[in-house]
Amino acid sequence: MFKKVLVANRGEIAARVIRTCRRLGIQTVAIYSEADAASLHVKWADEAYLIGKPRVSESYLNIEKIIEIAKTTKAEAIHPGYGLLSENPAFARRCEEEGIVFIGPNADVIAKMGSKIESRKTMAEAGVPIVPGISFPLQNVEEAMSTAATIGYPIMLKASAGGGGIGMQIVHNEEELRKAFEGNQKRATSFFGDGAMYLEKYIQNPRHIEVQLLADRHGNYVYLWERECSIQRRHQKVIEEAPSLFLDEQTRKKMGETAIQAAKYIGYTNAGTIEFLVDEQKNFYFLEMNTRLQVEHPVTEEITGLDLVEEQLRVAAGEKLGYSQEHIQRRGHAIEVRIYAEDPKTFFPSPGAITAFQLPEGEHIRNETAVQSGMVVTPFYDPMIAKLIVKGENRKEAIDRMLQALDSYQIEGIKTNIPMLKEVLTHPAFQAGHTTTDFVNRHLSNISIKK
Ligand code: MV4
């Protein structure tokens, strides 16, 4: 096992990774920007290095500076967390070149899964169900028209380099397609520097259900069940839960085995997640593969009893998984909510000094955060400042426990999205499990919440 690991991230995920390293007796190196000097992840690390100015381009994305700190501190491995450099093939390649273990899959797999068109093509070859559509970039709007005519409207136009719904648009007919094609191609080019567009059959009223998998470097693969992530606002997950109410045992098993089939085909190692679109008839289709630990991984940990960061560290250090599929338990129901420093009316970020911060405590209540009272939430980073995860014997118990925990969540000095979270959790449609991706638009009152 590694003696020292550098955590190339910030905020709650850096603090969370450091907590597991400390439990395993692994020395930790933190990096931080001028804006994060008071962050818990700096406090909890054995060593911490100021890496630059608040802007991520001048600090957390500085590959060469991170590599240099890893070398001078003799960190054998780097944990990239999520976001930032976690799915940057160049970073993974630089680590490999310097003999530093990148805790994740290899750079080629990261690159391949980073392109929506490439990953769609690869999954089709692997025999994984993909949404009917095309897996090559559309050359022009004429080709888009002829392709759409064969697939049949409505279609979903997508950017290969896309993410968060950018460059994506539902198109109902040729007229709309002509306008949509150029517009989204321009948006994708300006956002991602890559305007490659493709299209798929539009899946009506889908759910976003993703499967967590783990693969070691000795050919062992397991799936750690699914996460239901359909409650999203502007393509940002807000509430995640495990397991999904919507799946029956047969579909659950089929999705897990399909995720393993995909991982085997691409030679995946370490923790990964395959996102599926699931339609009303429980047909599931590959959406994308995330080659990093995800924000919502704690709900999987709560129902399996595994510590996914520990599993990542062990796999990266060359250990075998030490268990097989039949040993993976699934007990209870877990829900995670993301606490955003946002104005609940406008949903604009609400930076400022946190003057009071009291976390809910109790059995089966878990907090993940790096903020503490007196810290200033700055506009430089993602406004998510904490996650609250609860577990219950069943979904109803988990919902009730979450509502109690949110009631005792005390945070002053900034505004948060807690009122919206309560509105979702108390909504009869949510409690009945009608969690499809249009939930927020269909059921919530505050119009600014909508697209
Ligand atoms: C789709 C879709 C319907 N049909 N693709 C892809 C990126 C993800 N953030 C949203 N995506 C969707 N792709 C086809 N062919 C509907 C969505 C979608 C969605 C999917 C999951 C969770 C929330 C969503 C919100 C809007 C649209």
Image (spheres, helix red, strand yellow):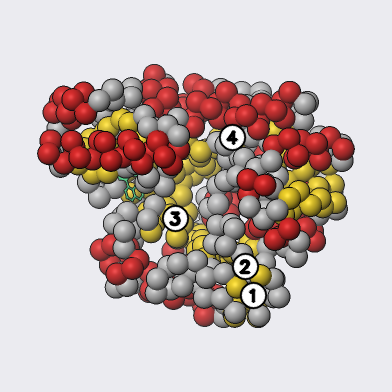
Q: Is the residue 445 above or below the residue 383 in the image?
A: below
Q: Residue at x 69, y 71 (%)?
A: 375
Q: Residue at x 18, y 36 (%)?
A: 178
SS at mark 2 in the image? strand
Q: Calculate the distance from the C-alpha at mark 1 to the C-alpha at mark 3.
A: 25 Å
Within-10-Å neighbours for mark 2: few <14, some 14–19, many 20+: many
Q: Earlier in the sequence, mark 4 or mark 3?
A: 4
Sequence-wise, which precedes: disc 2 or disc 3? 3
CB under 8 Å between discs 1 and 4: no
Mark 2 lies on residue:
377
- Say if mark 2 contacts mark 1, CB within 8 Å: yes
Q: Residue at x 45, y 60 (%)?
A: 239
* Disc assigned to residue 353: 1
Few, some or many residues within 10 Å of mark 3 (<14, 14–19, 20+): some
Q: Give the amino acid type for the residue marked by disc 4 in the picture.
A: Asn
Q: With respect to residue 421, does 214 lie above or below?
A: above
Residue type, numbered disc 3:
Lys
Q: Earlier in the sequence, mark 1 or mark 3?
A: 3
Of residues 102 and 391, the one nearer the viewer is: 102
Q: Determine the CA span between mark 2 and mark 3.
A: 21 Å
- Whichever of labels 2 and 1 marks the residue nearer the N terminus, that label is 1
Q: Which residue is at 47% across, 54% downward?
A: 242
Q: Is residue 379 above or below residue 362?
A: above
Give the structural element (helix, strand or loop) at label 1.
strand
For the residue carrying disc 4, how many other residues have a C-alpha within 10 Å: few (<14), some (14-19), or many (20+)? some
What residue does disc 3 label? 237
**Assess mark 4: CB under 8 A from ligand 1?**
no
320 displayed left or right of 232: right
Q: Nearer the viewer, mark 4 or mark 3?
A: 4
Q: Position of residue 3 (x, y in %)?
A: 85, 40
Report the residue marked by disc 4.
88
